[in-house]
Image: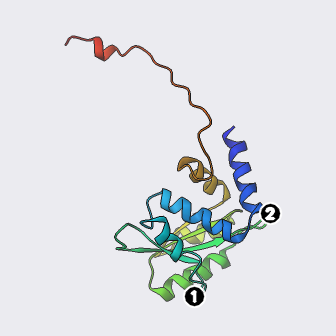
Amino acid sequence: MQSALRADLLQRILDNSPTFFERVIVDLLVAMGYGGSHENAAQRLGKSGDGGVDGVIDEDRLGLDRIYIQAKRYAAHVGVGRSEIQGFVGSLVGFGATKGVFVTTSSFSANAVAYAKHLPQRVILIDGQRLTELMVEHDVGVRLDRAIAIKKLDEDFFSEE
């Protein structure tokens, strides 16, 4: 069921506009505790448009550090290669940034993943599968349908020691 839900989430993202994809990223990052408020996060993401990044979000509510974001809404058969990661890293260097998140609806090539692992900057790669896992974990684009609670006897409660 979880696999089908994640596949449905990914397809719905691809069926919508690039602006919708940016909103998904904002909603997810805010749900994960980044960006302070949704309004502040939304103002920063998708507004940069220059310098090779799609947005900037505060790492915490105080804005002590910033995370630069690149978002690529690609079909599953179009992967992200090393050259795209290198371009993003070049932008990070240009901004004097040390942290970046590259989000795609598709996947990353093995060369892209290997390259990102050995950088002085911290660059997190989030592919379509991880994106939907995080969305489910943080209740973005999903809602609880039903929950089952099974109770059992609490042996510690009845112990007189």
Residue drawn at (47%, 75%) of the image: 121
Q: In the shown orientation, is residue 29 left or right of residue 21?
A: left
Residue drawn at (50%, 89%) of the image: 94
The kind of residue tagged 1 is Gly
Residue drawn at (48%, 86%) of the image: 95
Element type at marker 1?
loop
Q: Position of residue 91 (x, y in %)?
A: 55, 84
Q: Position of residue 73 (x, y in %)?
A: 71, 68
Q: Position of residue 42 (x, y in %)?
A: 53, 71
Snapshot quadrant of residue 110:
bottom right
> Which comes sooner in the sequence, label 2 or label 1?
1
Please state the total of marks drawn on the protein image. Answer: 2
In the image shown, does 19 or 92 lie closer to the viewer?
Answer: 19
Verify CB contact (< 8 Å) between mark 2 and mark 1.
no
Q: In the shown orientation, is residue 8 left or right of residue 94?
A: right
Residue depth check, mark 2 versus mark 1: number of the one nearer the observer: 1
Residue placed furthest toward the left: 161
In the image shown, does 110 or 40 lie closer to the viewer?
Answer: 40
In the image shown, does 20 or 81 lie closer to the viewer?
Answer: 20
Residue pointed to by mark 1:
51
Residue drawn at (49%, 69%) of the image: 39
Q: Reply above or below: 52 against 122.
A: below
Give the Cα separation between the discs numbered 2 and 1. 27 Å
Element type at marker 2?
loop
Snapshot quadrant of residue 82:
bottom right
The kind of residue tagged 2 is His
Query: Image quadrant for the C terminus?
Result: top left
Q: Position of residue 32 (x, y in %)?
A: 47, 57
Residue pointed to by mark 2:
77
Query: Image quadrant for the N terminus?
Result: top right
- Disc number at residue 113? none
Mark 1 surroundings: few (<14), some (14-19) or many (≥20) residues within 10 A: some
